Amino acid sequence: MRKQYVFLFTLIFIIMSVTSGDAFAQGHHYLIVGTYAPANENSLFVYKFNDATGEAQKISKVSTTENPSFFCLSADHRFLYAVSETHGGEGGQVAAYHFDKKTGQLKKLNEVLSKGDDPCYIHLDKTGRWLFVANYSSGSLAVFPVEKNGEVGKASQVIEHHGHSIHLPQQGEAHVHCTLPSPDNKYLLVADLGMDKIFTYDFNDKTGHLKPANPPYVEVTAGTGPRHLLFSENAKYVYAIHELGDRITVFKNDHGKLSEEQTISTAPPGFKQRNWAAEIQFSPDGKFLYAANRDPLNDIVVYKVDEKNGKLTYLNRYSTGGKTLRYFMLSPNGKFVLIGQRNGPDILMYQRDAETGLLKLLEQKIPVNDAVCMAMIPE
């Protein structure tokens, strides 16, 4: 009888461990946050994020890069590459960091010039050997090799755009805002906010060389300013959010040749003020698309994605009460939406319904000033 009780209590203990602490441990991620801050102040933060509860605990911080406003991670999560959004003198920089998953610490490896002013976007190609950087104020994009030790090399190619559009002063010259490689790594899409064009460049992942595709670009509605781009999971569609035009455009994609299928507003009906759209992200299952508006709306808009034709249907919008919603992300399990505030004291959080895609604002927040880029890494 005693042996039976011992066995029973042991079994209960194992079940409780699996359904409580151990399960939470398996659901932990590292949350990395980039901010606007001087190089001598903390600008990159690492938190441990609980996928089940949304709770976050600060692990480490870094103060070696000024304005790391956008970054990307290597596929194995060992390295982080961040822009330093600065201008004047020799322009901005690109920094490489090693990330230690055991300790949650970031260690800076090196930094090189971005070959332009105010770099605002960075992305790795699928091989992990090449970095693409958008230099906003210079209207240029640059390609950087990644060394075997994770360091970023000096720029191997720089392409400058020349042109403008009708929305002044924001479109008085070229402003490259996004450099997104295709899922098959054969071409690069480049959104130029200043020119109202989305460029396509053929890409050779052995040499890292870009060349204009045929056709070289697609024009969007004048004055709308394409900002960020997303591929659908099957790459049949490309989604562009327009910073100046309060809209999202859905393009049919034929190996980098884009043709407009739909344009839908990010602003409420009858809204007449100047608004600044910022970011778009898919839910993990690709069934919903989320968009952020900055000042003065400062809201999150939810759309349903039609699986057959890629088109969007408006579902709802949520006024956050935040200040300048520049960036947001969904947790890997899709349960939470984290929203950074360019001019706010913390990261706002929503709980998400996976079936309906709708959101519920939570009271809990993550105290990070001027959060403008986020990513999660499995613990």
Image (cartoon, rainbow, N blue to C red):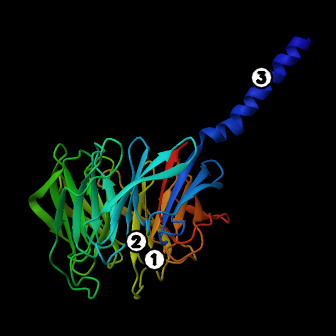
Number of other residues with Cα within 10 Å of mark 1, as a class: few under 14, some 14 to 19, many 20 or more: many
Please name the residue that numbered disc 3 is placed on: 11
Q: Is residue 126 above or below residue 181?
A: above
The residue at the far left in this view is: 214
**Residue 97 percent across, percent down from the top left:** 43, 52
Q: Earlier in the sequence, mark 1 or mark 3?
A: 3
Tell me which corner region of the image, top left, top right, bottom left or bottom right, holds residue 82.
Answer: bottom left
Q: Is disc 1 placed on a helix, strand or loop? A: loop
**Would residue 15 appear left or right of 151 to someone viewing this image?**
right
Residue 201 visible in the displayed image: yes
Q: Nearer the viewer, residue 2 or 232?
A: 2
**How much space separates mark 1 and mark 3, taking CA atoms?**
52 Å
Q: Considering only vertical position in the picture, is 148 above or below 11? A: below
Query: How many numbered dots are placed on residues in this image?
Result: 3
Residue labelled with disc 2: 278
Residue at the (44%, 78%) spot, across then down: 268
Q: Which numbered dot is residue 84?
A: none
| Residue type beneath disc 2 | Ala
Task: Point out which mark residue 294 bears.
Answer: 1
Identify residue type, mark 1: Arg
Which residue appears farthest toward the right when viewing the image?
1
Q: Are marks 1 and 3 in contact (CB under 8 Å)?
A: no
Residue at 44% in and 44% down = 77
Q: Amino acid at mark 3?
A: Leu
